[in-house]
Image (cartoon, coloured by chain):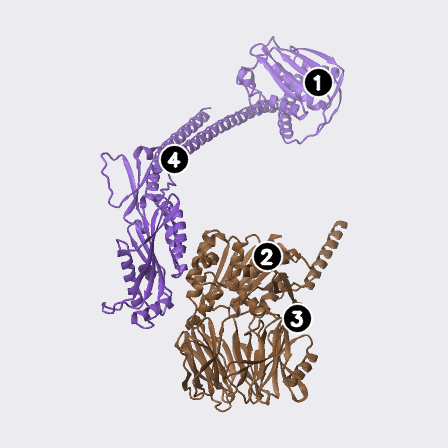
Amino acid sequence: MQESSTVYRKNFSLIIAFLVLISVTFIIALFISYSLTDRYVENEFAAKKIDVQEQTIKSYNDFFQNRIPEITFYHGFLDSASASRYARSVLSDYPFVTRIVFYDVAISKPINNELEGRQLGVNLKSLYEYTLKDRKIVVTRKGRLQDYSDFETMADKLNNFVTIADTSREPTQDDKFKTFYGIQSRKISYLNILSREEVKLYRELQKGSNAASVYKQNMLTFDLDQSLLKLKNPHPELYKNISIRPVVYDPIENENSNITAESPLPGAFSNYKLYLSSPKFYLDAEVDRRFLPIGAMVLLIYFFLVTISWLIYRNLNVNMRLFKLQYDFINNFTHEFKTPLSVIKIAGSNLRGDAELSERQRKQYGKILDEEADKLNDLMNKLLSLTQLENNAINLKVQEVDAEDFVKGYINTFKIKYPEFKLSYKISGSGSFYCDPVLLGSVFQNLMENAYKYSNPGRKELHIDTQINRKNITISFADKGIGIAKEEITHIFKKFYRIENQYNQNGSVGLGLAFCKELVNFMEGEIVVKSKIKEGSVFTVTLPFEPIGK
Amino acid sequence: MRKSLSVLFYALILCSIHACKNTEVRQIPIKDFFKTPEESIFRLSNDGKYISYLKPYKGKQNIAIRSLETGREYMATAFDDYAVREYSWTYNNQIVFIQDVIELDEYKMFVLDVATSKINNLLSLEKGRIRILNNRNKAEPDVITVSMNKRDPANFDVYKLNIKTGELKPYIINPGNLTEWYPDDDGKIRLVKASDGVNETILYRVNEEAPFKPIITNNFRNRVDPIAFIAGQNHFYALSNVNQDKTSLVEIDAETGKEEKVLLNCKKADIERVDYSRNKHRLELAVCEEEKPTKHFLSKQIEAIYNSLLNRFPGTEINIVGRDSSEDKVIIFTYTDKNPGSYYLYETAGAKITKLGDINSSLKPSELCPMKPITFKARDGLLINGYLTLPLGDKTKGFPVVVIPHDAPWRSRDTWRYSDEVQFLANRGYAVFQVNYRGSSGYGKAFNSAGFKQAGGKIQDDITDGVNWLINEGIANSKQIAIFGGGFGGFSALYGVSSHPDLYSGVIVKYGLINFFTYFKDVPPYLKPRLQMMYEMIGNPESDAEQLRAISPVFHTDKIKAPLLIFQGAKDESANISELNQFVRELKKQNVRVTYFLRQNERKVFRTEENRVDMYTEIEKFLDKNLRDNQ
C-alpha cells in the first residue's frame, strides 16, 4: 500500500512540473510572437513602399516605355494631324501629361559652314502645342517658342551622335537613350530614333555631300505634372498618408509620433519622392490586428497541451488502480491457496506423526483433505473458466430447463451446506426456459455464496424471485446482508476488486462477481445490482428467454 | 469468359477501324517535306561533257559534277558553313558561283575550274549583292559580266570580270537610275532600263561606244522587258503591256522605240515567260500562267521535242532548264502539283531520255493532294482566282482551313505548282486556300493596279470574301480557320485578324510586315529607286500617314486577340528586329498568346534544314492546339 502511494505522488509532481513548463513556454511564446509581429510590421512598413511606388508609377512607366517609343514607329513621318491624334490619346490616357509640343524637324546640309565643327542643318519646320481642355484637345500652332532650349539641346545631341556613332553596328540601348531622350525635371523630350542607314545618310550630310536631300525628324516634348500622378495605396493598413513631395522635404516632428518612409521617383519625376507616413498608434493597431490570430493559435495549442496532460493524468490514475488491484489479487490469491494448502500440510504431517489412527481420526483427516482439495479445485476452476470466458473459449450448450427443479436443486444444496441459511423462492410465469444450465448454475452458486458470506449471522437470508415471460427471464437474489457502499457499486464487477472489510479477510479473491458478469454477458444477458448499506443487496440477472447462441 | 471475349471483339473492331484510317492518309514526316533538296539545279556544260548539280554536303548545298564521258561523279565543292547559292557554267568549262555568308553579311563569288578542280575566290562584297548578267561569251570566254553595288549600296554598276586573272573592269557605271541591263547574244549590253521611281525608260545604244539614248518611257504600271535582238536587225523582242491590258510578246524597233507588231498574247493572263535560245537565236515558246501554266510554241522543232516528252510524261509540266551550245543535249525538269520535280537528260539524237535525279524522292505523288484552281466573286463583282488544296480522304466538307495570302503584291502571285508548305498542311488534314487577290501579277494591268493603295482595303476584302466563300460552300469549318503569311502576306494575316477577329482562330506570321513606315524607311539601299513606286502602290508616308497608321499592325496591338505564332530571321535586312520585339512585348502585355521565334543567322526564308523543320513542327503544334481543339 505504501509503495503505490509514493508512485502516486511522483506521478502528480511530474504533471505539475509539466503544467508549469508549458505555462512558462506559453507566456514566452506570446511575448516572442508579439515582438516578432511588431518587428515584421516595421519591416513591412519599410519594404512595401516599393509596391506603392510601383503602383503609382506604373502608368508613367507604361507611358515612358511604350507610348514614347511609338513615335519611332512613324520614322519621322508624323505630321500635324497624326501628331494631334497621337497627342490626344496620350493626353487622355495619361493625365499627368499636361502639354505636348510637337516639333516637325527638317534635317538638311549644314546651313552655316562657318560654324565650328560639322553641323547638320537641324531646322524647325513647324511647331504645335497640344493641351487638353474639358476632355477636348486644344491645338495651337506656334511660330516660336519662348524657351527654345529643349530643341537646341536635342539638336546638339543628334549632331553629336551622327558625328561619333559607330555605323557598323546597331546603336546600343544606352546610346539611344543618351541621344534620343532628353529627360529633365517634369519634362521629357524625344526624337525618333535613327536607323543605321539614316545615321549614314546624315553623316554624309554633315560632310556636305548629297546636298539636295531634306530628311524629316519628329521631336516631341511632354510636360508632366507630378501632382496629377494618381497615388495608389495597395497597403492602406500600413500607410495612412501618401504624398508626393520634393526630394528635400523633411519635416521636423515634435514627438516621434509619426513613422515615415520615402521612395524616390524615377525619370522626369526624379526631383520628387513618395512620402509615406503613419502615426505610431496606427501601426500599433495593425500589430495588434496581426497578432490576434497568432495569439489565438498559441492559446489554442496551450489548451490542447493542458487537455492532453489531463488525459495522461487520468490514464495514469486508472492504470494505478489496476496495478493496485492486481497486486491485491496476487496477495489474496496466494493467501487463498495457502489456507487449504496449509490445512493439507498439517493433516499430512499429523497423519505421518500419529502412530496409529483411530477410525474417527481417519475419517476426520479424510474429510479435511477432501474438503480442502475441493476448495483448491473450485478455485482453479473459477480462474480457468474466467480465462476461458474472456477468450470465448467455451461453447454455450443451450437446453430446456425447468425453473422449479433448477432453483429448488440449488436451494436444497445450500440448505445442506449452510443449515442456518434461510432460503426462499418464488417462480412466476411459465415453468421452463432455455439456457446453459451449467453456466447459470455457476451464477447461482456465486451469488448464493456471496449472500451467505456477506451477511451477519442471524440475518443470513436470501429470496430468489424468478420471473419468466415470453421475452426474457429475470432472476433476482435479495439478501439482508451488509450491503455495498454507493462508491463501491461501480467497481464490484471488476476483476480482482474486493471490498475491504472484515467479511472477506480470508477466502475471497474478488473474482466471484466478475465471473458472474462474464457468464451473464456470455449468455447475452445482463446483471445489475441495487444495494443499501446494512440493509441488503438485490442482484438482478436478466437473460433472454431463448439465447440465439454464438 | 464471355465478357472478355466480347471486349476482345470490340477491341479488334476498333483496331481495324483505326488501321483503316491510318492506311487512308499517312502522316508524312515533316523532315521529308522540308529537307534540303537531294539533287537539284542540274545544268549542262557548254561542250555537253559534264552535268553539274547541287547536292547537300553536311546539310549545305554544294556543287557535284558528273562526267558524261567517263561517268565519274564527285563533289566539286565542300562548304559546310554556307550553301552555294547560285551557279552557272561559263563558255570555257568554268563554274561561277555565289555564297551568302549571312553571319558577316557578305556575298562571295568563286570560280571553279572543272578540269583542275581548283576553286578561286573572285570577289567578296560586304553588305552588297552580286548578279551575274552574262557568262557565255564566245569571243571572250574568260570574261563574265556582273552587276553589283560595290561602289554605292544604292546603285548597281556593271563590271567585266576576268575569271582567270580576277581583273575587274567597270563596264557601265550607273548614273543612279539604271535598274536592269539586257545583254545581247554576244554579251554586249545595248539595252538598259532606267527608273526614276515612277517612270521607267528603256535606253538603247547602237554599239558599245555610242551613248545610250531613251527610246521608250512608261509609267511603272506598264511594263516593257526586252528579251533579245532579232538576229541581224535592230529590232528586238520584248514582253510589253503598253496599250493593252495583258502582257504580250511584241517586236520593237530599237531606233524609234515603236512597237512594230504583237507576236502573241493570251486572253486570260499575262505572258509570264519566253524561252529564247541564244545559241540558235530563236524564240522557242511562251508561257501564260492561267489556271495552270500554258505553253505556246514558237518553234516547230521545240514543239516536236515537247510533244515527244509529253508522251513520255503525260500530265506533267515540262521545262528545258539547261542545254549545251549545240543543243544536242538538254536538261529537262518535270513537275506537277504533287511532285516536287525530277531532272532528265534528253538527247535529240534518238530522243533518248535518261533520268538524272529527284529533288525530293521521299515524297510519293499518290500521297500528296491535288491543287485545284478556283474562282469566286468579290463583293464588288470582280472575279478573283485562287487555289484550293484539299486533304486526301472521303471528307469533302467542313475542313479546318489555313489561308495563305501571298507576299509582294504587284510583283507576284500564286501559281499552280508543287509547294512543300501547302502539301505539308494538306497532309496534316488542313484545306489550304491561296488567293490571288487584286494587285497580284499575271492577270493583266487593270487587275494589278486595282490593288494600288488597297493594302488593308480591297486587297484584304478579297481575302475575306474568299474565306467567306469557302464557308458558304461548306468547305471550311467556320470555327477552324487560321491565316498564315510571310512579308506582305504576314501583314494581311495580322490585319485580317485585327479587322475580323471572329473569322480567324489563329495567326502565323513569318518575316511579317508590321509597320509600313518602317517598311519604307528601312528598304535596302539598292531598292531605294523603287521607293516612289512603292508609295504609289501602298501609300505615301507623308501624305497618307493616317491611313498607313490605321493599317500598320504595330499600332494596333490592342485589336489582336487570336493566338499568334511569329517567326523571324535575325539577319532579314528588311526587318526591324527591335520594333518586332517591341510589338511582341506589347502583345504579351495585352495577354495575347504569342509565341515568338527569332532565329539568328537566317534571312527571310529559313535556309537551314533544322530551322525549317523546327518552324513547321511549331506550326503543326500551333494549329493542333488552336484549330483542332475548336471543334
Which label was assigned to residue A473?
1
Q: Colour of chain A?
A: purple
Marks 1/4: CA–CA distance: 68 Å
Residue A535 percent across, percent down from the top left: 58, 9
Indicate which disc residue B307 carries. Answer: none
**Chain shaded brown:** B
The quadrant holding residue A189 is bottom left
Q: Which residue is tagged 4?
A: A290
Q: Secondary structure at mark 4?
A: helix
- Dots 1 and 2 on the same chain: no
In the image, which is nearer the foreground, mark 4 or mark 2?
2
Please say if the residues under marks 1 and 2 sit with CB atoms less than 8 Å apart: no
Say what amino acid the circle numbered 4 marks. Arg
Identified by mark 3, the residue type is: Pro
Same chain for the residues under marks 3 and 1 in the image: no
Q: Is residue A352 visible?
A: yes
Judge depth for marks 2 and 3 and give the one in front.
Answer: 2
In the rendered image, which quarter is residue A5 located in?
A: top left
Q: Which residue is nearer to you in this view: B456 or A312? A: B456
Q: Is residue B137 left or right of residue A279?
A: right
Which quadrant would residue A379 be assigned to in this image? top right
Task: Give the label on residue B365, or none.
Answer: 3
| Residue at mark 2 | B481
Q: Amino acid at mark 2?
A: Ile
